[in-house]
Each structure stands twice: as C-alpha cells, then as structure tokens.
C-alpha cells in the first residue's frame, strides 16, 4: 500500500550536531527509483498542556521566541527528555513553567508540526483540578503566565493574536470539548 | 515593553548550509544579561491552500513525508520562492500540485509552526470557484489528490487520522467559516 508514494532510505548521516538542533541527511530512493537527498531535524518530541482552571479559564504563557523576534501567547509545553514518559513530561513541564500541579490528566491528540523537515510530534494533554505552587524555570528560561477565557482565546485565534500552531490547535480543541461536540475517551 | 522577556542578538552565523535546510546559530543576550546560543532553521515561509469545490467538498492531498516515514493527509501547500508574492505562490502551488485554478481567493490567517527552532510562517488562503486542469508536479514530487467533506475532515482531526498542523488548523477554520461563526474580511 502506498508504494507509489513511499521513499526508501538507502543511507545517511548526522550532518549537523548542534547544542539544540540535530540535522540528519539521508539518501532515499523515490517511488520512480531515482535517488535524492532528504534533510530533516531529529527531534525527541514534545508535550503541550491545556490547563483549565476550576472557573473555566485557561492558564497561558507569554514567551519570547528568538527565531521570530517576537513574544508569543502559548500553552505550557516542553521537550520530552530521553526515555521520559510523555505524561510524566507534561506534569513536569506544567509545574516547572507555571508552578501548577493538576489532579486530572487526559490525552487529547497528537500533532506533527513540520512534516517536511522535522520528525517532531507533540502530544496534547488536558489538565484539570489545578493547584497553584511555585514555578521552577530552567536556567535561561524567561516567561510569564496569565489566565484567559476560552472565548478570549478563540477571538485571538480568529484575529491573529495567537499564531503558534500548538496553541491554535489547543484552543480549537477546548472549544469543541466545551460545547460537548467532541469528547475525550 | 516585554524587556523582561526579550533576547538581543550579539552575533551569529550560518552553521549548516544544506540543499534544503539552513541552520543559523546566534549568540544572544538574555533578559538577565547572560549570554547563550540560539540555533534555528532559516525558512522562506510557505502557503497553504484550502480549496473548496462548488459542491462544498474539499480538495485534499496524500503525500509521503520522509522524516516521519508516513503518508499524510494535507492541504495543498508549498514554499515561497525568493521575492514571490504569497498569493501568487498559493495560485502556483495549487495549480502545480492539483491542476486546479481558482477564481476567488481570500486570505485566512498566518500561523507559525515551530517557534522554538524555525522562523517559518505559513499563510492560509481560501480558494473557491475551482476549475480542474492538469497537474505539473516538480521533479521528484509524488502525491495524490482526493476530495472529502468538511464533516469527514473534522472527524479525521478528532480521531487522529489528520495530524499535520496546517491541515488540522485549516479544517477548524473551514468549520468556523461554514457555520458562519467566523467571517473573512
């Protein structure tokens, strides 16, 4: 199945081994038998937390993102450590970045954010039963937290104030879950 | 404003100049004055087309994405050429990949898909008044097209059959536009 679309690896190597980014360059056979190169980022995967407070408002972050020289409104999120369970990562990142812990966790969805040039995936989790505590930001990590209603977040997606994909998608999911149109298992 | 979050560039260079990927490594000053490195992909930006046929169904693609070794359901999309107008790029990519041309084009939204490590943005356009023609795929480009209803696409987002972020977000937008809850200017 899908043999007319599939590409087969014939070789390759890590061509850039940075502090943060790893670039892999593989030689592949195309469906027509010709060979070409494919370059992509090797990424361990990440988690995104949709933290809904007891009053229905949502815990959000503002964080400067250097590649775009801009502060983004985002859900809490972070990279999965080697061997780490994604849900354990979500609990760790929520507490580190916001200080909050949550009683109820539910898996929402997986998304792929750069399928042309990265193997990154992001697991989205809904977190409820939140309790405030003290944040423990990583060295060199600067962000601020705030709360917003789902209606505000939807308006910011519509108007372009929220453009980060994990956040846009999380807001749409919260809208579907709040209306009861979609349910989590 | 946001001085407590912002990072300032103090130097940097292109550290990997590949066929497809360009990796920039900059030295930056953090809000607390300490220095660190930021690595990211330099990307020219891309466009995504949401092509809605006269009967309300949507023109989609299936394409193999090597980094994830998987066929993805996607909207037509492509990278902006140097100096190219994004709308012109959208018209070009729709015709090259699917053969279709469209009479009516409307800007929908901009999204950022990898804010931690890429400066990529994607401009989403709604295309209507579609007319079929012959596709002109690039050398080494393999994909197939099909049509689906918005309800099918929503169901595939919910169930995890669609995970590509530009496609997830485009489907949510089509849902909001169809219901009349959101309007384009």
Image (tube, coloured by chain):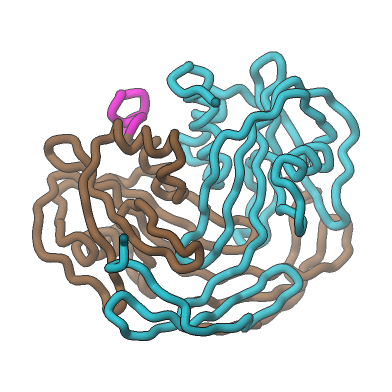
Chain colours: A brown, B cyan
- Tell me where residue A150 appears, x and y as whole percent: 28, 34
Q: Position of residue B111 (x, y in %)?
A: 52, 47
* Position of residue A101 in the picture relative to residue A162 (left or right): left
Q: Is residue A19 visible?
A: no
- Looking at this view, name the residue that lies furthest to the top: B55
At 15% from the left edge and 61% from the top edge, which residue is drawn? A99
Task: Indicate yes or no whether the magenta region holds residue B161.
Answer: no
Q: Residue at x 67, y 70 (%)?
A: B21
Of B86 and B78, nearer the camera is: B86
Looking at the picture, how far across and down is residue B61, in whole percent?
A: 70, 39
Residue B150 visible within the image? yes
Q: Nearer the viewer, residue A175 or B25?
A: B25
Residue at screen point 86% across, 52% down? B138
Establish if A82 lies above or below A177: below
Quadrant the C terminus of chain A occupies: top left
Residue A117's x, y, as percent? 63, 63
| Magenta region, residue range | A175-185
Residue at image coords 60%, 83%: B13
Above/below status of B103 relative to B38: above
**In the image as oriented, which residue stretches furthest toward the front?**
B1
């Amino acid at each position: 199945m899908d043999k007319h679309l599939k590409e087969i690896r014939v070789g390759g190597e890590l061509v850039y081994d940075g502090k943060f980014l790893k670039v892999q360059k593989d030689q592949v056979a195309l469906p027509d038998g010709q060979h070409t190169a494919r370059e992509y980022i090797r990424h361990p995967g990440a988690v995104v937390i949709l933290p809904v407070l007891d009053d229905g408002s949502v815990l959000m972050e503002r964080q400067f993102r250097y590649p775009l020289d801009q502060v983004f409104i985002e859900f809490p999120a972070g990279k999965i450590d080697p061997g780490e369970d994604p849900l354990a990562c979500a609990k760790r990142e929520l507490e580190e970045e916001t200080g909050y812990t949550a009683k109820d966790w539910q898996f929402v969805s997986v998304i792929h954010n750069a399928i042309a040039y990265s193997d990154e995936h992001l697991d989205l989790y809904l977190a409820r039963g939140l309790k405030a505590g003290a944040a423990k930001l990583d060295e060199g990590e600067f962000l601020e937290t705030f709360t917003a209603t789902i209606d505000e977040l939807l308006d910011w997606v519509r108007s372009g104030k929220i453009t980060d994909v994990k956040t846009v998608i999380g807001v749409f999911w919260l809208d579907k879950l709040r209306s009861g149109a979609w349910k989590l298992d």
